[in-house]
Amino acid sequence: MEKKIVYSAVQPTGNLTIGNYVGAIRNWVTMQNEYDCFFAIADMHAITVRQEPAELRRRTLELAALYLACGIDPAACALYVQSHVSAHAELAWVLNTLTYVGEAARMTQFKDKSAKHADNINMGLMDYPVLMAADILLYQAEYVPVGADQKQHVELSRDLAIRFNHRYGETFKVPEPLIMKGGAKIASLQEPTKKMSKSDENPNASVYLSDDRDTVIRKFKRAVTDSDNCVRALPDKPGITNLLNIYCAFSGSSLEEAEKAFEGKGYGEFKLAVGEVVADKLAPVQAEQKRLLAEKQFLSETLSSGAERAFRAARKTLSKVYRKVGFYRGE
Ligand code: ATP
Ligand code: LTN
C-alpha cells in the first residue's frame, strides 16, 4: 500500500524556539517512517518580512543542520529548501486566481504581522497563506503537522483545494492539519497568554534551541507566573500551565504525574526542574548541529537530493494543474 503524504515547513527566520521544536519538528521525526514526508525550509515565506540576505543564507543552512540534528532522516524523507523547487511559486500564482482578497485579508497572521511591520505591508505578506497552500497541495499531502497558530492557513489550503477541484475537476488531495495535543501552543515566558515566537523582541520571552544550559535555567527562573506557589495547570494560571506543558513535553510525563511530582513544592524548585529537563534535551541537539555545520558538502548534497525528490513529485501536480486550467502544452 502506498504511504500517505505528510508536508511541513519552518521559516529560516530568527532563532528557533522550543515552541517550534515541540509544536512542529519533534512531531515530524515520529512520522517520518510511517509516511512519505516532505520537510522544507520555507525561505520564500521568510522574505515576506525584511531579511538580511547573508543572514538568510546562513540561517537556511543552520536550519537544515538543525532538522538533521533533531532526528530528521534524509533517507526517509525529502528535506529541501523551498526556493530550490520553482513549482511552489508557479502553483501559488494559479491559486492566487482562486483566492479572494477578502479571505486573505482576514487571516490572523496577516493582521498580526501587518501591525508589527506597519512600514512593510507588502503583497507577499498577504499572499503568504496562498504560497503555503501551494506548498501543501503540490505534494498531495494528506497531513500537515503544525502548531495551533498555523491551523487557519491549513484550512485555507483545504478551501482552495476544494474550490479548484470543484472548478476544474478532481486534482488535489484535501489536506488536514495535524495539531498535537500538549505542545501545540507553547506560550511566551514573559507574557504567558501570547505564543512563544522566534521573532519576539524580548529574548527572555523565548527559549531558543541554541541557548546554553545557564541561559535556559535563567530564563525559566525569570518566567512570569502567579504568586500562589501551587504547581497546577488551571485556566487562571497561564504561566504555570505553560511551564507544566513544557515540562511534560520534554520529560515525557503526563500532566497528572507532573502535578503530583511537584505537589507541595515551591515555584523555585519547579522552575529549576523545568530548566534542567529542557537543557538536558537541548545539549545533544546543539552538539550534533554544530558537527553537521562543519560538513558543508554533506549538507549541500543532502539538500540537493531532497530538492530533486521534491521536484519530481511537484512537477507531476503542476503539469496536471496547467492542463486543467487550460494552458496550451503543445500538440
Ligand atoms: P515568527 O515569530 O517568525 O512568526 P514562529 O516562531 O511563529 O515565527 P514559524 O516559522 O512561523 O515560527 O513556525 C514554525 C512551526 O512551529 C509551525 O508549525 C508553527 O505552528 C510552530 N510553532 C511556532 N511557535 C510555536 C509555539 N509557540 N508553540 C507551538 N508551536 C509553534
Ligand atoms: N507558515 C508556516 C511555515 C510553512 C508551512 C508550509 C507549514 C510554510 N509552508 C507548509 C506547513 C506547510 C509557519 O510555520 N509559519
Image (spheres, rainbow, N blue to C red):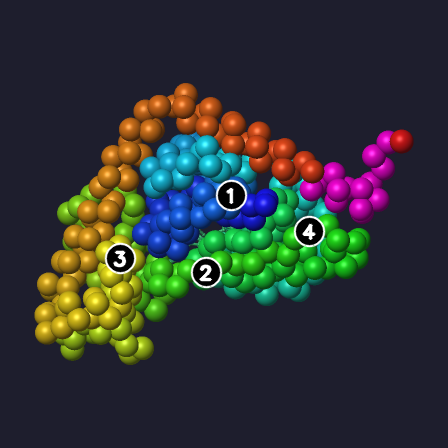
Label 4: few (<14), some (14–19) or many (≥20) C-alpha neighbours in 10 Å: many
Find numbered disc 4 in the image and state the secondary structure of the residue it sits on.
loop
Q: Earlier in the sequence, mark 2 or mark 3?
A: 2
Ligand 2 near label 1 (Cβ, under 8 Å)?
A: no
In the rendered structure, which segment of residues is drawn in magenta? Answer: 317-330
Q: Position of residue 228 (x, y in %)?
A: 16, 77
Is 17 drawn above or below residue 115 in the view shown?
above
Question: Residue at 24% across / 71% down in the picture?
Answer: 256
- Residue 324 in magenta stretch: yes
Mark 2 or mark 3, which is nearer to you? 3
Q: Position of residue 259 (x, y in %)?
A: 20, 70
Q: Position of residue 309 (x, y in %)?
A: 57, 32
Q: Earlier in the sequence, mark 4 or mark 2?
A: 4
Label 4 and label 3: CA atoms lie apart by 37 Å
Residue beneath label 3, please? 252
Q: Earlier in the sequence, mark 1 or mark 2?
A: 1
The amino acid type found where label 3 is placed reads: Gly
Label 1: few (<14), some (14–19) or many (≥20) C-alpha neighbours in 10 Å: many
Mark 1 or mark 2, which is nearer to you? 1
Q: Earlier in the sequence, mark 1 or mark 3?
A: 1
Residue beneath label 2, please? 179
Quadrant observed for ligand 1 in the rendered image: bottom left
The amino acid type found where label 1 is placed reads: Cys
Observer able to see residue 245: yes
Residue beneath label 1, please? 37
Residue beneath label 4, please? 172
Label 4 and label 1: CA atoms lie apart by 17 Å
Quarter of the picture containing the C terminus is top right
Q: Earlier in the sequence, mark 4 or mark 1?
A: 1
